[in-house]
Structure formats: structure tokens, C-alpha cells
Amino acid sequence: MAATFELHDRRESARRRAPLFAPSTQRRAWRAASLAACVALWQLAVHFRLSAGFITFANVPAPSDALPALWSLLHSPKLPMHLAASIWRVLAGFCTAAVVGVGLGLAIGRYRAVEDTVLPALEVLRPIPAVAWIPLAILMFPSSELSMMFITFIGALFPILLNTVHGVEAVDPRLVATARSLGTRPLALYTEVVLPGAAPAIFTGLAIGMGTAWFCLVTAEMIAGQYGIGYFTWESYTLQNYPDIVVGMALIGALGMGSSVLVKRLGVALTPWYRLQETRR
Amino acid sequence: MSSVAIEAVNAPARVNVRALSVEVGPPHARLTTLQGLDVDIEPGQFVCVLGPSGCGKSTLLGAIAGHIAATEGTIAVDDETVDRPHPERGLVFQQHTLFPWKRVIDNVAFGLKMKGIGASERRRQATELLELVGLGGFGAHYPAQLSGGMQQRVEIARVLINRPRVLLMDEPFGALDAQTRRMMQTLLLDIWAKVRTTVVFVTHDIEEALFLADRILMLSTRPARVIADIPVPLTRPRRDESTLDPAFIDIKRQCLALLRDVA
């Protein structure tokens, strides 16, 4: 019993330390200094053309090259085009995956017949990394645009689907029984009980899916794209615009993180009761 | 205050259980929890079901609610055979069956929403019921913000809004501390005095059964049979002093002996 309390307390304090409260100014300064030190080390490594035989910084662009490159990209008319292309593909792939994943997950989690019909095929496909689909996707879809969306879709689908199934299966059967004895019909059972009950797990899946969607998109763009941030990064390599590689990487990171945070925020806003329940336990 | 919603209650129902057998579990490990059970409950009666733990008390309740199918025999509520759950047979579990994502008022109003009643009307009725269980002003809270006893009051209000003709309660106060439990028992009796529905109340607490019931059904170990049908002729309204009544103590002694024999 004591052990459980202790564990609980530790979790509680961990939560408090996390982004809930802003860290003190001193700690913030320390963190900023750590970041600055990393950049400085990078700059030094490039400046002295650090080379250890198996790794070399001789060809790596320095931060002092990357910053101007970023600046000029931010003013370039090509940036909105690249951004729009990538964001549109991610949105299309991710939204399709969300609809399919949540829809299938709700059915699979509730009905054994659906599970036995649909899940075996999905289980076979699941371990195949989305990136491995690229050659086949190019063959399957006449439009390279569609093939990239498809890769993004595949990447986002499985985390969303599996988390939804898990969330639905974890809905307390007594809540379902209670709802039924209060006069709930099968369709309303989904909207009133199963969907809200699984919502926290679904949003976890969506946030993970958003991350994998960006990961898969960038890879797909490097191979099949003509616009997009991934394409931009790869093109910079082939054109030997090395500072732009770093800029592309940074943009990909920012977009992936930003959209994941957005999904998480949305989840928190839509399930206000969930945090209450967690802190109570 | 407790005007429309409460007084327009449906007439309490008669419950007839005939030769009821229930088997549960997967096909290779069938367990007969009830066998050849006969129970008749008069309209408006408050019946407590007592028995050793794991004897099938909850199974009986689940079967009357319509969640558990009878393997043999029948259950009829006012001569209508039970084959599925129905809002007129309200079921209250021990704890944690409020919808955590709905505010208290929407939990209470849930049954009316399922009947297709408009938002303002169902909120009005839910507010009335919350007042009845002493939780006026807590409508906007989420269940996780309430104590265990308050959550059970919400449960009761949520079931009562459907104007059940039978109220089925599965150890509803089992998880509460002794003081809260007695408070809830008194509250339940007060509500029952106004609502006058038939109540089937499962408990393993002899004192609770005596305090609440008109009649106690004592079940045997699995497969459960009725081994004693004990009337509780104590006067109502019952208060704390009722538990000191010689008749109370006498029946309690009788129940203890019976439980000792079956266990």
C-alpha cells in the first residue's frame, strides 16, 4: 500500500515538473545555455574540420551558414509552395488515416466478427514499414501525389487504428451495461459511451500518427516528390546547397512537432474530464 | 420541490422468478450459478437478497435487469417476460459507473436523452432529481470531482429519472465508509417513501439488509437456492434507533446463524 502511494507521489511530482508550470528563470537560462553550447560545439567542429576517420565534419554546413540560408528561404517565393505541398499531403494522408483508423478501430474493438474478418490482414500488413511501400505505391498510383499521400496514410493508420482498438476494448463493460439498462440503442451506445470512453486512447494514437505521418511523408518526398520540404532537403543535397539541408531538417522537425502538439492540445481540450480522473487515481 | 418528475412515477411492478437456472462462463467451463430458483416480489416491496459471497446474488440481479440470459425458467415483471435491459428496470452498481465524460447533470439526464426528450426539459427534471438526492448545485461538476457517497447519489438520481418500476441495486453502498453508508441508507429509504418503487437490493451486510428491507431472501452457496424468506416487520420510518430494537437483534441473530450454516 505504501509503495503505491509513493509511486503515485512520484508520478504526481513528475507531472508537476513537466510543462504544467514554467520552470524558474534560472533553470530556463541554464537550458538556453545548454542549447547554445550545442550550437557552439557544432560550429567549432565544422570550423576545425573535425574528423575522426569514420565521421567527418568537413562537408557539414556550419550554423553560421545555416542561419543565412534559413533567412533567405524564409524570403523565398518557393517556401510557401514547399510548405503547402507538404502540409496538404500530410493533411490528406493523416485525415484519411484518422477516419479509416478510428472507424475500423471502433468496429473491431466492439465486434468479434469484424475483428476476425479485418484484423488478420491488417496484422500481416502492420509490421511492414510504410517506407517499404514506396516502390509499390509508385506502381499502384499513376499520380505521384497520390502515392505520397498513400505512404503518409499507411504511416499514420496503424498507430491510430491500434490505439483506437485498445481504447474501445478498455471501455468498462459496466458502463456499457449501465447505458443499455438506461435505454441506450446500439448507435447511441457508440456516440455516448464507446467513442468518449476511447477518446483519450484515440488522441494518443492521433498524436503518434501525426508524427509518423511526417516521417513517412518526408521519405516519400525524397524519392517521388517535386515539391515539399522533404524534396527540398534532398534537392539541396543533390544541388550541393549544403546549408539548405540543415534548414530543411529543422523545418521538418518544427512542422512534425508543431502538428503533434496541436493534436495533443485538441485532445486535452476535448477530454477535459480525463485529467480530473487521472489526478484522482 | 420534488413535484412532476417524482410523482408521475410508474406503478411499482411485481416480479416473478420461476424455476430460474443460469449458467455463466465459456462453454468449456460452464458454471451453474442459479438453479431452480423461485422468487415472487410484491409491487412496492423492498427486498434484500443476502447470501455468502459468490453465491449468485449479482447474477440474479443481472438476470432481472435483463443483462444475463436465463438458461432455464422465466423472469416476468408484471407478467411481461424479461429478455433484454429496459429503463423501467433501473440497475445501480457498487461504484464507478457514472459516465466520467459527462457532467453530473448530464449523467442524471442521460435516460431522458435516450428517450429523445429535449435538452431544456431533461435538464429541468435532472435538476429536480439532484435536489431530491441532496446534490442541488453540483450539476456542473464532473463525477471525478465528487466523493464516493456523492457519486452513488448521482447514480440513484440517474436511475430514478427513468421512473423505474423496479429498482435493482447491487451492493450500491458497499464501497462507502460506515458513516456515509448509514446516511445513504436513510436517504434511500426517504426517497423510496416518496417514489414507492419495487426494490431488489443485493448486499452481504446483514445489518444493512435489516435496516432497509420489508423482507430478506437468504440464498445458499452456488448454485443458489432460497434457504430462508424472512419478513422484517420493523416500523418505518427507520432510524438509527431501529437497529437497537429487540426484533431487529432477534432477526439479525437468525440471519447470522443461517449464514454460518450455509458457509
Image (cartoon, coloured by chain):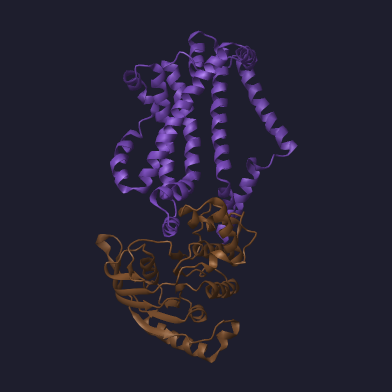
Looking at the picture, tell me which residue is in the foreground, B243 or B87. B87
Pinpoint residue B8: horizontal percent, then vertical percent.
Answer: 51, 67
Chain letter tied to purple: A
Chain letter tied to brown: B
For image coordinates 67% across by 26% down, the residue present is: A37
For image coordinates 63% across by 49% down, the residue present is: A13
Looking at the picture, tell me which residue is in the foreground, B174 or B67. B67
Pinpoint residue B225: horizontal percent, then vertical percent.
Answer: 33, 78
Picture quadrant of residue A137: top left
The C terminus of chain B sits in image quarter = bottom left
For image coordinates 40% across by 76% down, the residue present is: B52
For residue A188, say whether it is visible: yes
Pinpoint residue B89: horizontal percent, then vertical percent.
Answer: 42, 65
Examine the rendered structure and indicate whether residue B190 appears above or below residue A261: below
Residue located farthest toward the top when viewing the structure as drawn: A239
Number of numbered discs visible in the structure rendering: 0
For residue A60, say whether it is visible: no
In the picture, measured across the screen, residue A168 lies left or right of residue B181, that is left
Examine the rendered structure and indicate whether residue A196 appears above or below residue B177: above
In the picture, measured across the screen, residue A272 lies left or right of residue A138, that is right
The N terminus of chain B sits in image quarter = bottom right
Pinpoint residue A125: horizontal percent, then vertical percent.
Answer: 33, 33
Examine the rendered structure and indicate whether residue A220 appears above or below residue B64: above
For image coordinates 42% across by 60% down, the residue present is: A181
Picture quadrant of residue B88: bottom left
Looking at the picture, tell me which residue is in the foreground, A115 or B92. B92
Picture quadrant of residue B42: bottom left
Residue located farthest toward the right when viewing the structure as drawn: A25
